[in-house]
Amino acid sequence: MKNIPINLAIFVTLPSLAGAAIVSFEAESGSLGSAFTIENGALNASGDAAIVPIDINDDFTSDQPTSAAHVVTYNVTFDTADTYDLWFRVGTDRGSAINSQDSVFTAARFGVIDTTSDSTADWTSMNRFRITQDEFIWFNVSAGDAPTSNGFNRNSTTFNVAAAGDQTWQLGGREENFRTDAIAFVSTNEFDGLTALEATSRLDASLIPEPSSTMLLGLVPIALLGRRRRA
C-alpha cells in the first residue's frame, strides 16, 4: 500500500461582515482642497490621522465655503437604498475652554455644490463643539442639535439614497480649530433602542477593515490510500 500526499488549497466564500446600514470612511480619504491638510498621529484619531483646515480665517462669518480650496470631496458607495443620517467624529485643537473657532460647513445634499451658494439647501454649518483637547467624539449632524448650549447646528438634513451606487458628498472648512478623522452615513433607524455608548461603539467598529470575503483556510495534506495491485 502506498501513501500519496496531496496538498489542497481550500477557499471558502463568506458573507460580508459589515452592515450596509452604516457606510463609514476615514476623513483623510477624500480629495482635499488646498486649504486642508492631513494631521498624522492625532491622539484618539481612527487610523492615526485627521484632516485640519488651514489658511482659513478664524473669524469666518460667511454662509458658504467661498472657494474650492476650502472643500473636501468624497465618493461614497452605498450598497442599500435608504434614508441616512450624517455622522462625523470631530475633535478640536484648543480644548474645552475655547468655545469658538471650531465651526465647519457640511453639504446639505449629494453632488458637487457651488461653493458660493448661500442657500441652506446647499451648505449648512455647525459651531462650538468645545471638545476636550486631543479627543474625538461622534456627532449626529442630521439630528439638528447644537453641539453645546451656546453653539449652533443649522443642519437637520437626512440624505435619501434612491438606489445603490456612488454618491458625491462634500465638507467645507470654516475655521481652523475644527478637525475630523471619520465620517459615516447611518440608516436613520439603525441606532433605535441603543445607548449613546452602544451607538458610538458600532460606529467605531465599522471603521475596522473587514477580512477578505474569500479566505484561504490552509493547505491541507491528505493521504490518499490506494492498494497496490498484485502482479
Image: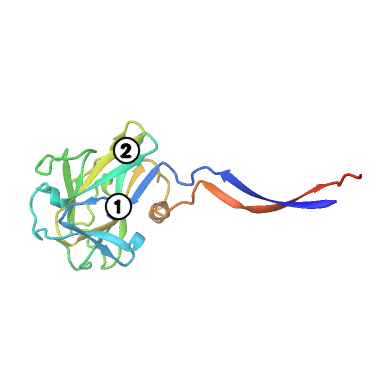
Left or right of 71? Residue 226 is right
Measured as percent of width and height from the top left, residue 82 is found at 36, 35
| Residue drawn at the location 14% of the way across and 52% of the way down | 70
Left or right of 145? Residue 67 is left
Q: Amino acid at mark 1?
A: Ser
Lower position in the chain sequence, tag 1 or tag 2: 1
Say which quadrant the C terminus sits in.
Answer: top right
| Circle 2 residues within 10 Å: few <14, some 14–19, many ≥20 | few
Q: Amino acid at mark 2?
A: Asp
Q: Disc 1 vs disc 2: Cβ atoms closer than 8 Å?
A: no
Q: Can see residue 89?
A: no
Q: Which secondary structure, mark 1?
A: helix
Q: Which secondary structure, mark 2?
A: strand
Number of disc labels: 2
Q: Quadrant of residue 133?
A: bottom left
Measured as percent of width and height from the top left, residue 123 is found at 16, 43
Q: 211 or 107, which lies in front?
A: 211
| Residue drawn at the location 85% of the way across and 51% of the way down | 1
Question: Disc number at residue 85?
Answer: none
Position of residue 54 relative to residue 109, above or below, is below
Measured as percent of width and height from the top left, residue 83 is found at 33, 36
Position of residue 2 relative to residue 20, above or below, is below
Q: 156 or 54, which lies in front?
A: 54
Q: Residue furthest front?
A: 231
Residue that mark 1 sits on? 29
| Residue drawn at the location 8% of the way across and 59% of the way down | 59
Q: 15 or 157, which lies in front?
A: 15
Question: Disc number at residue 166?
Answer: 2
| Circle 1 residues within 10 Å: few <14, some 14–19, many ≥20 | some
